Amino acid sequence: QVQLQESGPRLVKPSETLSLTCTVSGASITSYYWSWVRQTPGKGLEWIGYIYYSGATNYSPSLKSRVTISLDTSKSQFSLRLNSVTAADTAVYYCAARIVGATSPFVYWGHGTLVTVSS
Amino acid sequence: DIRLTQSPSSLSASVGDRVTITCRASDNIGNFLNWYQQKPGKAPNLLISSASDLQSGVPSRFGGSGSGTEFTLTITSLQPEDFATYYCQQSYTTLTFGPGTKVDLK
């Protein structure tokens, strides 16, 4: 079955860069939009962005200036970089797969990883 | 961005109750509306896509309806495993989620 697993540092200092990687198994890398979503108690679920196997990306306008999502098809991994972080970026970060086409729901999710921004 | 609101924000119900959750969009989104269930400490789980398409493996007591700006998630007979938080999500434009509706035990 399809599995997604987030990995990366759980603690990031303010002004530094948050980096996470999602490893995908059981799914074709060409069949989904590979996405990042975060969740905080205050703002709820927030879509960050996605990458398609072609390399095309789409980011949330509110985060676009600080976000980069990349894809390594040889490793079946995609990654998130969020720079200049503040405490407001403390959240549970999920990687997720959206179906290409139709209403593109998120059909597969990682377990999520809590990233804390603190000095 | 299209804003989604959900009502109620929380509700208390008993096993066997019929539960209805409403999601309203700030603009017409056609049927580009999906519903998720989330339990504490877990990732959201897709229940319904395209406003009314039940996902494989999701019990038939879950149903979705609506189009345009108003959508409904209905649980016809609440079961113990249904106590959770429910989110709507639109994919018509920049993806957004509703704030959630928490369903707990009365």
Image: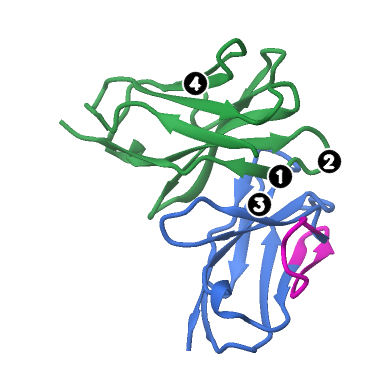
Chain colours: A green, B blue
Q: Which residue is found at the position 62% from the left and 52% from the top?
A: B3
Task: Tell me the CA gap for discs 3 and 4.
Answer: 23 Å
Residue receiving disc 4: A79
Identify the chain of the residue marked 4, using the numbered disc in the image: A
**Kind of residue at disc 2:** Ala
Q: Nearer the viewer, residue A119 or B25?
A: A119
Taking the image as shown, residue B4 lies to the left or right of residue B101, namely right
The reply to the same-chain question for discs 2 and 4 is yes
Contact between labelled residues 1 and 2, with CB atoms less than 8 Å apart: yes
Q: Label 2, label 3: how many angstroms apart (C-alpha)?
A: 14 Å
| Residue A105 image label | 1
Q: Secondary structure at mark 3?
A: strand
Magenta range is: B54-71
Q: Residue drawn 79% across and 44% down?
A: A103
User: Are marks 3 and 4 in one subunit?
Assistant: no
Whether residues under marks 2 and 3 lie with C-beta atoms below 8 angstroms apart, the answer is no
Residue displayed at 57% across by 28% down: A24
The chain that hosts pointer 2 is A
User: Same chain for the residues at labels 2 and 1, yes or no?
Assistant: yes
Q: Amino acid at mark 3?
A: Gln
Residue at the disc numbered 2: A102
Q: Is residue B71 left or right of residue A47?
A: right
Q: Amino acid at mark 4?
A: Ser
Question: Which residue corresponds to the image point at 62% horizontal and 13% vertical from the top-left?
Answer: A73
Instruction: Name the mark nearer the viewer: 3 or 4.
Output: 4
Question: Where is mark 3, residue-wise?
Answer: B89
The reply to whether label 1 and label 3 mark residues of one chain is: no
**Image quadrant assignment for residue B21:** bottom right
Whether pointer 1 and pointer 3 mark residues with C-beta atoms closer than 8 Å, the reply is yes
